[in-house]
Image (cartoon, coloured by chain):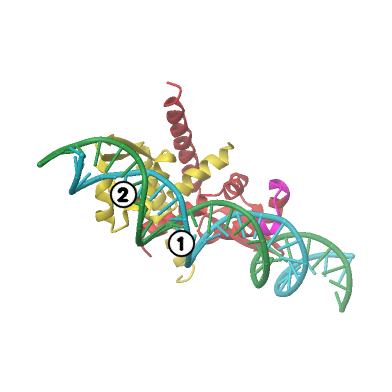
Chain colours: A yellow, B red, C green, D cyan
DNA sequence: TGAGTAGATGCGCATATTTGCATATAATCA
DNA sequence: TGATTATATGCAAATATGCGCATCTACTCA
């Protein structure tokens, strides 16, 4: 695959609020997937699919423990990336607001 | 809007190979939008829409100069973000390959 | 003013994504 | 073994996205 395609895939995987919420939930370390539906007030199958997308994008790692699936962020640098992007998002927002309210 | 939604919007805007190519083209500074169709071998209306998405996500800034639209990356930090993410993408790829070819 | 250039947009089509529901699979434990 | 728990998946519907073509608008310049 091409360089930009690869990168776009990663960004696409990050481009959904529910998936970002899952990442936020896993910020402090490994957690059971079974906690997510309750914690996020989302349907179980919905969670399952979002988790699948994150895992196959290499953003999450999953590990089986009996019937449970334990999840963690694959690489702590990803969390830094989220923080950086959040800063950029807020910056951009401020700038765009300023353009209307000078 | 909610925090995660805002962030997701930004990631979604970055989640397309053609849009990343536009950003790559603008890496060294301001350029005319009119160069893009030729440079990227893409249809004019296609470019126009991708540019619109990037501008309204706050990733690009546009400036009119006669009939031309001059484009630039809104914030240089965005380019760093792309580089960082590229590293993460390649890292993740290596790791996933290693899992198959230990 | 009229031709030319740059850009935006309506339309239609194809494909992709997200979701809930119901159901299937798989591991655990009484 | 049979019930329970955790997770995955088929299906169908709704919505979103990406694209090319044709067309429209706006600015420039001869």
* Most frequent secondary structure within the magenta stretch: helix
Within the image, what quadrant is residue B1 found in?
bottom left
In the image, A43 versus B49, the foreground residue is A43
Magenta region: B38-46
The image shows residue A98 at horizontal and vertical percentages of 45, 66
> SS class of the residue under badge 1?
helix
In the image, A1 versus C24, the foreground residue is C24
Q: Is residue B100 above or below residue D3?
A: above
Task: Identify which residue is drawn at 46% across, 61% down.
Answer: A95
In the image, A90 versus C17, the foreground residue is C17
Q: Is residue A31 above or below residue B33?
A: above
The residue under label 2 is: A24
Q: Does residue A59 appear to the left or right of D6 in the view shown?
A: right
The image shows residue A101 at horizontal and vertical percentages of 45, 71
The image shows residue C9 at horizontal and vertical percentages of 64, 70
The image shows residue B43 at horizontal and vertical percentages of 71, 54
Magenta run includes residue A93: no
The residue under label 1 is: A95
For residue A11, say whether it is visible. Answer: yes
């Amino acid at each position: 695959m091409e360089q930009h395609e690869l990168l776009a895939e990663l960004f696409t995987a990050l481009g959904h609020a529910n998936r970002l919420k899952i990442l936020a939930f896993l910020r402090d370390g490994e957690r059971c997937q079974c906690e997510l539906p309750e914690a996020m007030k989302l349907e179980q199958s919905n969670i399952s699919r979002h988790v699948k997308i994150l895992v196959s994008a290499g953003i999450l790692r999953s590990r089986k423990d009996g019937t449970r699936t334990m999840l963690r962020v694959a690489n702590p640098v990803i969390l830094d990336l989220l923080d950086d992007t959040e800063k950029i998002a807020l910056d951009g927002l401020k700038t765009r607001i300023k353009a209307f309210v000078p």
